[in-house]
Amino acid sequence: MIREQRSREKLKSYYRKFRDEGKIDVNVHPWVAEAWRESERLGVPQVGTEPKHALSPEDFRVLQKKHAHAIDCLSQLTEGVQEFFARYGLSLLLLDADAIVLKSYSLPFMHLPHGKVEGSRLGVEEIGASSISIAREKRTPFWVFGPEIWREASHAGDACTAPVLVGEELHYLVNIVVNDPAAVPQDAVIAQLLLVSRSLAAALSRDLRLRAQEAILDTAPFAVYHILPSGEVVYANRLGLERLARIGARDQETSRLSNLNDIVLNYRHTPIYQGFSGTPSYNKEVTWITAAKTYEDITTVVPLESPATHEVSGVVTISMPIEDIRMLVAHTAGYTAKYSLATMAGTGQAFYALRDKALRVAHGKHHVLLQGEGGTGKQRLAHGIHQASSRAAGPLISFRCGDVQPELIAEELFGVAVSPAVSRPGKLELASGGTLFLDEIEKLPKKTAAALAAALREGKAHRLDETVVRPIDVRVIADCDSDLKRLTERGLFDRGLYDLVSRSVIRMPALRNRREDIPLLAEQIIREIAEQHRMEPKQLLPETLTLLEQYDWPDNIKQLQSVLEQAFFHTAGTVIAPENINLMGDVKPDDNWKSDREIFLRAWKSAGGNVSRLANLLDVSRVTLYRYLKKFQLEKP
């Protein structure tokens, strides 16, 4: 591209010779000669300066938006050389692959203001032979001396253009016009042009590679995170972002990610935290405890070392919910129940009656309906019934009806034909030979519930958008927090499915109605937490058990589990005292409950609607509390 300096007078004579006689002097560069002939053939005028505006202002705004990344990137690349351009009177343009000017960065081009050149096409058809047309045609940087430029108004200056290639494809052109060639060394201009164009090409290549990698990660069936030692999540793929949103670690409006230290209650006992000390972990079963939910994953953690200091600068974490993994291997390995009836703790009469009935039901063949308030242990009981049944060797497939959009529930249950060549099974088909646990069955749309009832009666089903009928052999265990019989009588639930699942009904007592079981349940929960995390067990003091036994537990065993998990991980020693128990959950004493109705409602719920207990929790008098109950329109009847 660097061409040795030529006599401008001679170059002018070559230009006039071609203009007047149509003859190319042997000393004219072959590429320039070729561009001159093309300019003449196209009838491009040699006089005038203003280029043809190819785009309307509206179309140009659309084009700039499309190429905003490259425009901004070049702006950043040229920040440090603006003084150089200004000192020597240089013009800088960014053009797209069609030679349309996207941005003018410095002095006016061809003595025209930015508004005249931006949005114009500067191809050979518009302005004739130039460094732009030659570099675009030949895909290589090229320097053109002023008298070689087709437009005579540009003969006083020189120009050079470099193509920006990503792979073998032309994406952009970077053009520099030297208005006073005698004032600046040619090699300095060329050096700046190559630096800018190659840096832009490298940035675009890196961006393309990153977007490809991100697309790959977003289609992967597992969550991927990049986490800093501070607990900050600096990257998450699509599934990772979805999971962070479900546990409240991602703000839906701002998309900001929370620090894991603030979200994961057992964060310091996870492989991620160990990874910051340089310890990798591969395919390890991990329990993640959050205020919203407890998750179980198969997790891999790889420490990342800083090239400069060789210290761990972060970790890459890959995790996949065990439930998803089991779904993938349901036909080959099968699901197994996590709990047996023997893991259910209790000593009271209500508990023994419940367990005896569950054992009898498990040995039968009818579908089962578990009724009771939320958090009473229906899921554990469903696992126990499956484990005690003749279907224990078959898969146990769980489906939470409330977690799926109503219009997608049928696809999840029955499967769907994605294309003529690709079809995937649903939960009903995967559970064949075993048990299908339908959590929150009351949230099944009536049409889907009716189709499920028909499939269970006939012992066969077909996937959506498919005509192939497949046999199924499934026992359904369903749970419902509300009264399913009343919902059916009101026409809100399908009668046919209710008749099927209600042949064996087990009613789960609320925890407040089996207070005698609370101490044993609490000790079992603490023991299971210690075993899951391979930690030393902790002791619950008698007065702590008394405190727990006296509480109403409006959210039942689920709430007891959450309170004890918080106490376990926030207690430094091995003994959990009453002061380590926070019955209000995540409603902290310093929360502004007096002015925030939402916080007050959470505290009210934690107290089970009991005025005396709420007054003690908030450390205020009953008189004061009644004032706030009235303020928030929660007066007791």
Image: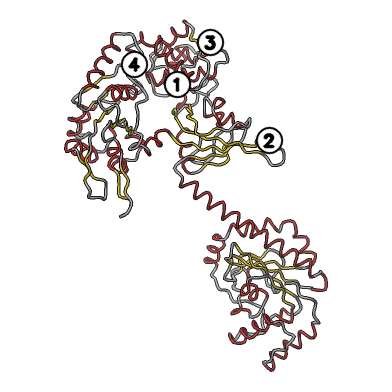
Q: Is mark 1 on a helix, strand or loop?
A: helix
Report, in whole angstroms, how far the alpha carbon at label 1 lies from the one at label 2.
Answer: 36 Å
Report, in whole angstroms, how far the alpha carbon at label 3 lies from the one at label 2.
Answer: 37 Å
Q: Do the residues labelled 3 and 4 touch (CB within 8 Å)?
A: no
Q: Which residue is drawn at 78% across and 62% down?
A: 84
> N-terminal of the two: label 3 or label 4?
4
Query: To which residue does mark 4 refer?
Result: 342
Identify which amino acid the numbered label 1 is placed on.
Ser
Residue 74 image offset from top left, x and y in percent: 66, 59
> N-terminal of the two: label 1 or label 2?
2
Depth check, mark 3 against mark 2: the one in front is 2
Residue 157 image offset from top left, x and y in percent: 75, 76
Report, in whole angstroms, how far the alpha carbon at label 1 lies from the one at label 4.
Answer: 22 Å
Query: To which residue does mark 1 refer?
Result: 562
User: The C terminus appears in which quarter of the rendering?
Assistant: top left
Vertical relation: 287 (above or below) 342: below
> N-terminal of the two: label 1 or label 3?
1
Query: To which residue does mark 2 refer?
Result: 311
Q: Which residue is drawn at 69% across and 93% down?
A: 20
Q: Is mark 3 on a helix, strand or loop?
A: strand
* 518 sits left or right of 69 in the view: left
Q: Are marks 2 and 4 in contact (CB under 8 Å)?
A: no
Report, in whole angstroms, how far the alpha carbon at label 2 lies from the one at label 4.
Answer: 48 Å
Depth check, mark 3 against mark 4: the one in front is 4
Give the class, few, some or many, for how many residues have Cα within 10 Å of label 4's Cα (few <14, many ≥20). few
Depth check, mark 1 against mark 2: the one in front is 2
Query: To which residue does mark 3 refer?
Result: 575
Depth check, mark 1 against mark 4: the one in front is 4
Could you say which is closer to the camera, residue 31 or residue 445? 31
